[in-house]
Image: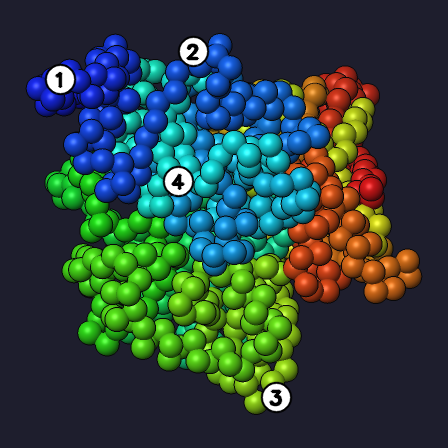
Amino acid sequence: MSIRFRHLRKILRILPQIRSGSQCEQSREYLDLLASSPIRLLHSCKNFNTGFSNRGYFAHRFSTASLVSQDSSPIVDVLSLIESTFDELQGPSHHWLNKDEGNKDFFKREGTFLVIVGQFLDNAQISGCDPSFTFEKVKLLQQRFPQLHVIGVQSGSQACFDADHSKLLQWIMKDFLTFPILSSNKISEMINGACCILFKDFQNPVIYHEKDLDVGILSEAIEVLTAQDSQNSKSRSIFTNRWSKQVEAIKEPRLFMQDLFLYFPGCVSADEKGNRLFLSDSNHHRIIVFDNNGKILDCIGSCPGFEDGEFESAKLLRPAASFYHDTDDCLYIVDSENHAIRRADMERRVLETLYPSCSSDKKNNGLWSWIMDKLGVRRDGDTKPKEFDLQSLIFPWHMLKLENNSFLIINKSFEYLWIMDLNSGEIKEAVEGFPKIWDICGQLIMEKVSFLKQIPCDWLQQLNEAACSPRETPYTGLVSSFTTFQNQIIMCDIVGQRLLKLNSESGICSNMQFSNFGVLGLPYWLPLPLERVCSEAHGLKGTQPDHVQCFRLFPGRTDIQLNIDLPVYTELVEPIQEGCIWCQARGAAAEISGAERAIGSLEKVGAAQQWYDDLDNLAFSTPESELTIEDADVPLDMKSGDEQVHINCAVNTSPGSSEVIIYAALYLKLGKHPDLQEENKDKYAARIADILKADSKGRMSRESCIKLLLSTNRDLRDLIFVKHLHVRIKLDCFDHPKAENSKDIILTDSSIQVNVSLQT
C-alpha cells in the first residue's frame, strides 16, 4: 500500500505539467505510463524533473510489442538472444560459464531477471578500471533478493570470444561471482557501453546506463517486481539476521579450482612471537593456521555461512584480511561476503562476531534462545539488522591497525573506508571516495607496500595485475596480501594459488611447503554432503561413487582393506591421515572402535540387540561425548608404503544387508614420471584437468581448465590438489551358523579386500 501511495504522489506531480503544444507527445508518453508498470512510472517521474544528464543514470522502457515492428529495440534483441541460449551450454557464438547445472529452475523463462551487460575485460585493459565495484553492487542486490535471477553478459568480438574464457574464470574466482555469465560475440553490436537490464518474464525491460550504479533505485524497482511474484514472501535485508542459522544453502561457483589445496589465498597475517601465520583461504571460506615450516596447526571455519562457535563448526563467507592482537591472543578477521568483522579467540578456539553486534535482549539468551538459534527459527524481532547505508560495512576486504586501538577497514575497490573501535566494534566514521581515503591512510599503506620492492619484478607485476589496485597508486591492492615474518616476506599468489616466501637476506623466493593436511579434515565441497549420507537410508542420488562392490558372507567381524591405485603420474604429498577419512556403517553392521579392534571383540551382534543399543546411546549420551565417539570410533589404518594407498577398517555384521561408506581426501601432485620429465606445461595442465574431471557436469570445459592452469605461470608439478575418494561396500550376511547342540551360534571372522582404481 505504501508503494502505491508513493506512486500516486508522483502522478499528482506530473498531471499539472501536462499541457498542449510542443509537449503533446511528451504528455501522451506520461499518460501511457498510467497503464504501464509502476517501475517505469517511478523512474520516468524522477527523470521528468531532473533530466537524464544530471542524474547518474537514465532509463528507457521497451515493450515487447516492438518485436512486431521492423525497428526492433536493441534491448529486446539482447533479451531474445539470451533466452535463445538457455537450452544450450555452448554454441558457435556463445558460451555459458559458471552455470549451475543442478539448478533446474533458473533457466526458466518466468521470474524477475537482472542482467548486467558490458565489455568488462576490454574496459579493464584499456581504462585500467576494475569492474569489481559494479559486481559488488549487483551482489548486494542478489543477497537481498534471493529469488532474483542475476545474469552477467560479456560482449566482445569473435577474435576475443575464445580467448576471454580463462580471463572470465579469473574474474569469477577473484570476485566470487555466483551467477552465470554468458560470453557472446553478437551482443557487442547491440549495446553501447555497460548497462543493467531489469525485466520480468522477458517482458517490459528497463535499461540503466550508468557509471555508478544506484543500488537504492534498483532495489526499489526489484522489490516491486518480486512482490508480484509472491505476496507472502518477504525480501531479506542486505544485512540480514546474522544470528540465526542460515536455512538456505550458500550458492557458490563450482569450478575445478575448488579442488586445489588453496583456492584464492587472498590475505595473510602473522604472529611472530607464537611462530604462527594466518592464511585466508578465501574461496574455501577458512583461515589456515600454520608455522614457519608450513606445518598446519589449526583451521578456523568449516563451510560457507555465518555462524559463531568452535573452530570446527564456525562458518565464514570469504574471509579476507586479518590482524593478530597479541595482548588478548585474538585474531580479528574481515568476513567479506558477510559484511562483518569476526574475532577468533586462539586459546579457547572459539569464533565470535564483533560487528555487526547483536541488539537482542540479554534476557532472551537462555537455553530456549540457543535452541531456536540452532534450529534457525529465531524470531526476526530478536535482532535489529543494520540498514543499508554508508555506515554499514559493504564487502570489506583490507584491515589496518592504528595506534589508538582502532581499525581502518577498506573495501576491495578502495571506494569506502570505515574507522572501527577495536573494543566496542562500533563504526566511528565512514569515508567515501578514493582521494579522501588516501588522505587518511595513504602514508600507512605506502610504508607497508614499500617492502614489495624486494620481490622480483616479474612476479610482482603478475600479482599486481590480479589485484584490485586504484589506477593512481599501483600495488595498493596488495597491502593485505603479504606480511613480514622474521627475516622473510610471506606473499599470497592469487594467480598461482600458492603462498610464496622471500628471504630478505638471500633474496631467494620459493613456495611454502605445507604438511599435516589431516588437520583440515574432509572438504565441505565433497560431491555429496555427509549429512545426506547419514540421513538417507537407501540409494544416494546425484553422485557417482568411484567404486561399488558387493560381498556375501557370514555374520561376525569383518576386516576391510581398501587398496587404492592412484591416478597415473601422481603421488601422495604425504601419507594419508585419519582426519582426511570418514567411514560410516549402516544397516546390519556396526563399526568397531579402536580399542575393541585392538583387543578383539567377542560380542554377539544381533539386529534387535543393536537397535536397543542405539536407543541407549541416544538416550544417555551427551552431545560432547557423541562427537568424541564419532571421531574416535573410526577404526582406520592408513598405509602407503608401496605404490598403492591402503585404508583399513573393521565392522561387526549381523544377518541381513548392510553398507559401509568410505570417503577420503587424497592430497596429490604430479609425480616424477618418465613420461612427464620433459618441460611441457601443456601436458602437465592436461593431466591435472583429466584427473580433476574438469569437463564433468556443472564445471567448465577441459580447454578452459587447461588455459587457466597455464596462466598461473608456475611449475604445475608443485601444484597440490585434492582427489576425492568415494567407496561403497555392500554386505549381505546369511543367518548365524548353528553349533552342534543347535542352541549356540558361531561367530565367523571374515576379511575382504577391495581394489579401487582412480586412474583415468
The residue singled out by tag 4 in the image is 139
Quarter of the image for residue 737 reads top right
Res. 755 visible in picture: yes
Q: Disc 2 marks which residue? A: 65
Q: Which residue is mark 3?
A: 506
Residue 316, horizontal then vertical, whole percent? 41, 48
Q: Residue furthest front?
A: 21
Q: Earlier in the sequence, mark 3 or mark 2?
A: 2
- Say if 331 sits above or below 338 in the image: below
> Residue type at mark 3?
Ser
Mark 3 vs mark 2, CA separation in Å: 71 Å
Q: Which numbered disc, 3 or 2, marks the residue closer to the eye?
A: 2
Image quadrant occupied by the C terminus: top right
First in residue order: circle 2 vs circle 4: 2
Q: CA distance from mark 1 to mark 3?
A: 81 Å
Instruction: Give the mark nearest the N terminus, 3 or 4.
Output: 4
Badge 1 marks a residue whose secondary structure is loop
Q: Which residue is mark 1?
A: 19
Mark 2 near mark 4, Cβ–Cβ under 8 Å?
A: no
Q: Position of residue 426 (x, y in %)?
A: 18, 57
Q: Nearer the viewer, mark 2 or mark 4?
A: 2
Query: At 22% from the left edge and 71% from the top edge, which residue is drawn?
Result: 405
Amino acid carrying mark 4 in the image: Lys
Tag 3, which secondary structure? loop
Separation of marks 3 and 4 at Cα, in angstroms: 44 Å
